[in-house]
Amino acid sequence: MQIGKYTVPVCVGLVGFAIGRLTVVITPMTGNLPSENFSIMVLVFILLMVALAVFYIAMKYDQPGLAYMGMLLLVIIALPKVFDYYSSTKSAIPPGDYLVLSKYKEQIGDYESAVKYLQKYIDTNTDEELNDELKKMITELKRKQLADTKPIEFESKRMMVPTQKSSEGGRSP
């Protein structure tokens, strides 16, 4: 019985399944590849294909140690670095929630944080009309922040400064 003719199709199917599972784990909200992060997934796919090619060539030339070492290096070094990069570029907060957070911070009087969240939303949003409205809101929040700040009051205390001692040994006033 020849098992070789079934090995490649089964491996391709398993690799496809693994990539699908990774996609669901990486993007848990939708399960689809978002367009801005598609390049990361293409990079992972290319890394896997190169690793499989190296594995196949090494096994073909009777070098299983090299093949397994290459796969081990890929799994231990390359893929975690790619996923760390992806995690660092991906925001943990959905862009729409920045508006909610900003409104909440405004209600409790934390205008500085409200401005920060509005600015983060502007950075992720492409709608120019909405961005102009949000910039007006930022200006209004800054005015509120300035209006709420209390003037700094300085308290002065009278200090006794020693002067030259008089001949009686006391202090002069």
Image (spheres, rainbow, N blue to C red):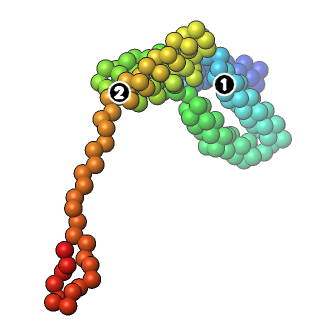
- Residue 60 horizontal/vertical position (percent): 82, 37
Q: Say if 98 sits above or below 80 in the image.
A: above
- Identify the disc placed on residue 41: 1
Task: Determine the CA span between mark 2 and mark 1.
Answer: 49 Å
Q: Earlier in the sequence, mark 2 or mark 1?
A: 1
- Residue 27 horizontal/vertical position (percent): 54, 21
Residue labelled with disc 2: 147
Q: Say if 53 sits above or below 122 in the image.
A: below
Q: Nearer the viewer, residue 49 or 90?
A: 90
Mark closer to the observer (2, 1): 2
Identify the image quadrant of residue 1: top right
Q: Residue at x 78, y 37 (%)?
A: 54
- Residue 132 horizontal/vertical position (percent): 56, 13
How many numbered marks are there? 2
Q: Nearer the viewer, residue 40 or 101?
A: 101
Element under label 2? helix
Q: Residue furthest top?
A: 129
Element under label 1? helix
- Point out the image quarter for the C terminus: bottom left
- Residue 115 horizontal/vertical position (percent): 45, 25
Q: Residue at x 23, y 85 (%)?
A: 165
Lateral position of residue 119 relative to residue 126, left or right: left
Amino acid residing under circle 2: Ala
- Identify the disc placed on residue 61: none
Query: Does residue 148 show up?
Result: yes
Q: Residue furthest bottom?
A: 167
Identify the image quadrant of residue 140: top left
Amino acid residing under circle 1: Met
Q: Residue at x 70, y 21 (%)?
A: 12
Q: Residues within 10 Å of mark 1 (few under 14, many from 20)?
A: some
Lateral position of residue 97 relative to residue 164, left or right: right
